[in-house]
Amino acid sequence: MLYSLQSTNLFILSLLAYVIGAVLGPILAPRKAPASSAGRRLAGYAVTAVFLVSAIASLASLVASYMVLSSRASVDVSPFPLTPFGHLTFRLDPLSAFFLLVISLVGFAVSIYSLGYARSFLFKRHVGLLLFLHNSFLLLMTSVVTVTNGVLFVVVWEGMSIATYFLITYEHESQPSRRAGFLYIAMTHVGTFFLILMFLTLFSHSRSFDFDSFRITASAMPWGSKTLVFFCALIGFGIKAGVIPLHIWLPEAHPAAPSNISALMSGVMIKTGIYGMIRVFFDFLGTGLPWWGFAVLILALGSSVLGVLFALMEHDLKRLLAYHSIENIGIILMGIAVALIFHQAGNDGIAIVGLVAALFHTLNHATFKSLLFLSAGSVVHSTGTRNMEELGGLIKRLPYTATFFLVGAVAISALPPLNGFASEWLTFQAFFRGFDVAELSVKTAMPISMALLALTSALAAACFVKAFGITFLGTSRSRHVQDIHESPWNMLAAMGLLAAACLFFGIDPSLVISRLQPVADFVLHRNPSGALSVDVARSISANPTVNEAPVLVAVLLLGIAAIAIVAIVVLRGNRRSRVVPTWACGLEGLAPRMQYTATGFSKPIRMIFSSVFRPSREIDVREPMSPYFKPTIRVDLKTEAIFDTHVYRPLMNSVLAALRVLRKVQTGHIQSYLAYIFITLIVLLWMAL
């Protein structure tokens, strides 16, 4: 009872703090620079104060969600009176509490990061608008995962989408930002259409928009209606999650937003789509048709493999990270697909392993992807460019940023002892459990899925070797790397917090997983128990590869490093070091153009998967002004955006052609419009009879 009261008070405090931060932001942050230096300092303090308010709000909701997960009990919060559609109630059940914890953890780190990052916008852009949108964005994401009414869910979902649109177009002078904002808002409204259709279908059977009524009546729905709800949820939430082929907005929008907002979008906003899928597939619909899980699995495998392949071709650092969000959404959906397949087959033991793996990777992806976007933001903040071909040698000038980026790169590559390895290995274990089932379809799908997951992990490691090596190693390739300095301490502190979370979740995954099984029990409508289920225990506690291996690998790596350092010191003895130029095939010095490039690194993979990328090459030869000089040759390599070229562009052309036909209806004559009204009334009367 005490836990319930404390978590309720903390949750209400977080909501109020977000509202206060959203209101105070435009008031306290001036749009133009004050005349006096004291006024400019005061404006800086005001921006800091508002971001601290959002950090306090995130911390309060973080503690509240952790208390709910620890107590394994749901908490209802009704801070406002009745609305026309029912009680405005926020509910912290285990599923909502988990996603609220993910949102709050990243929100706290990003708020601390923004203390230094947003100062670069002060007196150059409307920082008050950024403060308002930042707090509103966090408030609306919190509301999305905690409201308990379908109409209110659509309202806060649309509010979150609109806030995201204005954050994407914050630098509205940029044409790519405007294009990304338009593409996002168009796609998200398509998703909202399917969500409204889903809720109307559920309402037609329950006669209520409350989630409790959906849960009670969904089991008695006919299979046709349940399948319609399933597909509407898969499309509506899949667009927000960035599932291929519904992903086209994501690689455009994430790089366009400010880097602190990119971390929120990639780290937690796309996870609201995962929340919606889990809520509808398991909590509302319960047991479904056997092929539902296989449909999700196909989308998951396509998203993971194609996402990492597209990332390998990118030279824009933030765009590369955006494609990796698609990849990791695919990995999360693999766990959800396993849970669907085995829950529908009545094997909830294996279903729990898959669902726990999906939830664990949701948390892990939020930490390491937010860390990578914040590190990329530090690079952009210092150099002013996102093009890896113009960077290089940053490890000497940005050593802390390089270290934190390396931690995130190791984690996303699923290498021990960091958290990406733990959750991906648990996903492998979920697939391994499929061999215990007799169905041929399951026995065929599981090894194929394991092979594609292994391919995804290997390609991700190769991609981040490129990203880290080209960006931070070698020598500088352009003027952007000259005269730069490390980011402010608050930006580094936020990155350090997320890096520590990556290490902690990887070294002791059982501590996290023990909090996740009650969430899976709740979602699958099982009686929660204090101990891990048999299948989870076999996959985690009894399997040393997940539980003990990260610790052993960490100790082993530290031991090898210590031995290497001692060996170097002993072998060197008292010999003095000698500094000489880098050998460059007999040439004096090493020129920046002699280094490995991102294009050269990815060429073998581009050739192997040429059927996917469909590369093309344009060669421009410019003859010199004098015969004594050689011609200038420029080679331009391009890869084809297959979904844009073969899916969305033809679809858009078809829609525009249909609209041109419909435009003929707009004749400009009042007689035509009266005839339209008369025909509409006749149809409505006929439908009413």
Image (spheres, rainbow, N blue to C red):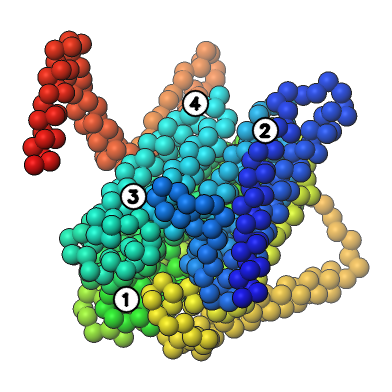
Q: Residue furthest top?
A: 669
Estimate the spatial distance between the alpha carbons at disc 3 and disc 2, rounded to whole Å.
33 Å
Amino acid identity at mark 2: Pro
Tell me the residue that label 3 is attached to.
Answer: 195
Looking at the image, residue 610 lies above or below residue 342: above
Amino acid identity at mark 3: Leu
Amino acid identity at mark 1: His
Q: Is residue 671 left or right of residue 264?
A: left
Name the residue: 28% across, 72% down.
287
Sequence-wise first label, 4 or 2 = 2
Sequence-wise first label, 3 or 2 = 2
Tell me the residue that label 4 is attached to.
Answer: 175
Tell me the residue that label 2 is attached to.
Answer: 26
Label 4: few (<14), some (14–19) or many (≥20) C-alpha neighbours in 10 Å: few
> Circle 1 sits in a helix, a strand or a loop, which is it?
helix
Image quarter (top left, top right, bottom left or bottom right) of the C terminus: top left
Residue 76 in the image, given as x and y percentages of width and height: 52, 64
Residue 322 in the image, given as x and y percentages of width and height: 49, 48
Name the residue: 73% across, 48% down.
52
Tell me the residue that label 1 is attached to.
Answer: 343
> Of 676 and 244, which appears nearest the observer?
676
Q: Is residue 546 visible?
A: yes
Label 3: few (<14), some (14–19) or many (≥20) C-alpha neighbours in 10 Å: many
Q: Nearer the viewer, mark 1 or mark 3?
A: 3
Image quarter (top left, top right, bottom left or bottom right) of the N terminus: bottom right
